[in-house]
Image (tube, helix red, strand yellow):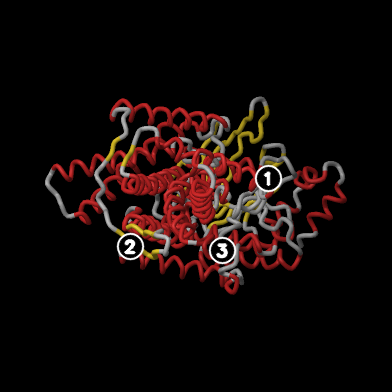
């Protein structure tokens, strides 16, 4: 891990009353790489995501995001829309949170709010159709169209997102997050509920995001076939602390990881881990 | 038949005014889930600002009616929008994450504040203005002497309403602001994560609602030739009823509900008794809500996962 780090989580601790959800957690995510955060249920993975994306204010510790241009942003100090606007971090949730009443295209257009906002200068200019704003709107539609094509939903651009099949909604959500043009994409269980074929398509999509666009990805995932196939680096958590990290191969062979995953039942744990190979 | 046609015209004009106010209720409900009880008083403020602007322009010696109307329209929209923005900022935003009833109580309080402030500042008497827009058309004259009149002011109210609705519909369905508003309506957290400034979007909702109410205030002033500090109460309740009748949260529903309330009220007054027109309007509301709990165009509440 001597590469270029985009995200540095430094001794992060999150307490809720007397319960310590995350304790003294440190890890890095490399730029243009896929980092996976795994661990059994209740390990504190989503809590880490919530700290990164401004939902929780960490009890202690720092989360730093280093942009390409050298700016370093203290994520623990930002919240709300500033996470997307200033830090350029996008995230998805375990459950699907598209805007169900809006079309697929509109969902992707909302994600380009900030680009359009810059172009319109301020709201009223945009409303009277200033030329700069029109161009920006056109570019926004082009980008949205491009993403719809990437996730194979172009022919359904004008359908309400709520009517899409589950797997399509998952892909549309990733497309929407990418339309914010993030530096770091955080995905919370993107493969949850997908069948094997859809999981494979998801892996392909995430790899293309990394390879073609160079976007850094941080993901939480239980589907080991996805994790093992696409991750460059894996961080394993259990009971709020980091118990291991390394490449997929290193992690898979780590006895601590196997033990954490299925308690003492090592045989079953091995089975889970090997499903990824 | 002639009498009916005349009442239809009158009802549509009244309904247009209710509809413009109702949009403000339904928009705010859609995006923050509260009933802005001060919205009727915003309408009243709009009427007063229009009146004051009229008097100022006339005392400056302006005589060109179209110019006066345009200036009055813009000034009352701008200042009333400022009222709407301010009320949201000081009375609702601090309570947004408080318990559910808090913003509603604050809204009721705000309504009293605006009513009493206008009473103190402008006096309790009804303020009349001379008729600005006179004349009209006789559409039909029946043998027994009944005349269907369509006055210029009625034409103006309806045309203004239609124009505003077209602009407003374009705003909500085609522009960035409209998309942001709909996104915030469906999932504020997610909208924020995509970079939408939710507070700002909510402010804009109040601003637009107040501007539409100001137009309604101006139309009321021109149509009835008077304003008073208490007019926001009844008009506000009626418009709120219209919004609920149309399906709260639905924009076409608000306009449809406004027209329905205006027509019911007018026809009841024409064929039955004027004294019971409000009873009729609200009775029909109750009947509709019993059989269509989500209103005419409302969607059933979808449980958020």
Nearer the observer, disc 3 or disc 2? 2
Query: Where residue B26 sits in the image (x, y, percent)?
Result: 51, 47
| Residue in the picture at 24% in, 50% down | B132
Q: Quadrant of residue B117?
A: top left
* Same chain letter for marks 2 and 1: yes
Secondary structure found at label 1: helix
Nearer the observer, disc 1 or disc 3? 1
B252 sits left or right of B65 in the view: right
Quickly name the residue at label 2: B137
Quickly name the residue at label 1: B290
Secondary structure found at label 3: loop
Query: Where residue A37 sits in the image (x, y, percent)?
Result: 65, 49
Sequence-wise first label, 2 or 1? 2
Q: Are marks 2 and 1 in contact (CB under 8 Å)?
A: no
Above or below for B13 versus B239: below
Regarding residue B266, the answer to whether it shows in the image is yes
Q: Which mark is residue A55?
A: none
Secondary structure found at label 2: strand
- The chain that hosts pointer 3 is A
Above or below for A99 versus B59: below
- Which of the pair A107/B9 is nearer the observer? B9
Spatial CA distance of label 1 from label 3 is 32 Å
A156 sits left or right of B124 in the view: right
| Residue in the picture at 42% in, 28% down | B112
Query: Where residue B176 sits in the image (x, y, percent)?
Result: 43, 58
Quickly name the residue at label 3: A103
Spatial CA distance of label 3 from label 2 is 46 Å
Above or below for B187 versus A131: above
């Amino acid at each position: 891990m001597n590469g270029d780090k985009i995200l540095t989580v430094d001794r992060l601790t999150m307490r809720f009353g007397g319960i310590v959800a995350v304790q003294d957690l440190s890890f890095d995510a490399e730029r243009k790489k896929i980092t996976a955060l795994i661990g059994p249920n209740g390990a504190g993975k989503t809590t880490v995501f919530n700290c990164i994306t401004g939902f929780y204010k960490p009890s202690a510790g720092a989360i730093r995001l280093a942009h390409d241009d050298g700016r370093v942003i203290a994520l623990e100090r930002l919240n709300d829309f500033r996470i997307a606007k200033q830090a350029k971090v996008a995230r998805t949730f375990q459950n699907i949170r598209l805007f169900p009443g809006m079309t697929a295209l509109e969902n992707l257009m909302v994600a380009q709010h900030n680009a359009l906002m810059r172009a319109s200068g301020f709201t009223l200019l945009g409303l009277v159709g200033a030329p700069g704003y029109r161009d920006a709107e056109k570019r926004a539609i082009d980008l949205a169209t491009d993403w719809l094509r990437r996730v194979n939903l172009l022919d359904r651009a004008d359908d309400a997102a709520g009517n899409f099949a589950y797997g399509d909604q998952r892909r549309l959500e990733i497309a929407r997050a990418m339309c914010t043009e993030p530096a770091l994409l955080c995905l919370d269980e993107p493969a949850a509920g997908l069948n094997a074929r859809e999981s494979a398509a998801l892996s392909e999509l995430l790899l293309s995001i990394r390879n073609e666009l160079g976007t850094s990805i941080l993901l939480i995932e239980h589907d080991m076939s996805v994790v093992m196939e696409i991750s460059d680096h894996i961080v394993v958590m259990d009971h709020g602390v980091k118990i291991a990290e390394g490449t997929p191969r290193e992690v898979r062979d780590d006895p601590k990881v196997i033990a954490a995953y299925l308690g003492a039942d090592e045989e079953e744990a091995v089975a889970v881990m090997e499903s990824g190979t | 038949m002639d009498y009916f046609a005349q009442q239809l015209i009158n009802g549509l004009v009244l309904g247009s005014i209710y509809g413009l106010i109702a949009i403000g209720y339904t928009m705010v409900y859609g995006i923050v889930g509260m009933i802005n009880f001060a919205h009727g008083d915003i309408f009243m403020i709009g009427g007063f600002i229009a009146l004051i602007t009229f008097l100022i322009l006339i005392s400056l010696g302006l005589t060109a009616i179209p110019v006066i109307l345009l200036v009055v329209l813009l000034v009352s929209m701008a200042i009333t929008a400022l009222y709407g923005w301010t009320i949201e900022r000081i009375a609702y935003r601090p309570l947004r994450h408080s318990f559910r009833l808090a913003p509603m109580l604050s809204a009721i309080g705000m309504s009293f504040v605006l009513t009493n402030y206008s009473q103190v500042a402008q006096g309790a008497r009804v303020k009349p203005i001379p008729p600005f827009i006179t004349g009209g058309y006789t559409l039909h004259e029946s043998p027994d002497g009944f005349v269907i009149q369509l006055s210029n002011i009625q034409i103006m109210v309806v045309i203004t309403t239609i124009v505003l609705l077209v602009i407003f519909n374009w705003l909500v369905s085609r522009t960035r602001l409209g998309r942001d508003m709909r996104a915030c309506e469906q999932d504020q957290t997610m909208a924020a994560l995509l970079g939408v400034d939710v507070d700002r979007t909510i402010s804009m909702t109040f601003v637009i609602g107040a501007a539409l109410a100001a137009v309604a205030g101006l139309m009321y002033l021109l149509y009835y030739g008077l304003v008073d500090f208490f007019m926001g109460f009844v008009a506000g309740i009626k418009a709120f009823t219209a919004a609920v009748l149309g399906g709260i949260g639905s924009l076409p529903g608000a306009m449809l509900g406004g027209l329905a309330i205006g027509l019911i009220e007018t026809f009841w007054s024409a064929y039955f008794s004027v004294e019971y027109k409000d009873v009729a309007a609200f009775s029909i509301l109750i009947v509709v809500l019993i059989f269509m709990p989500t209103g005419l165009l409302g969607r059933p509440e979808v449980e958020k996962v």
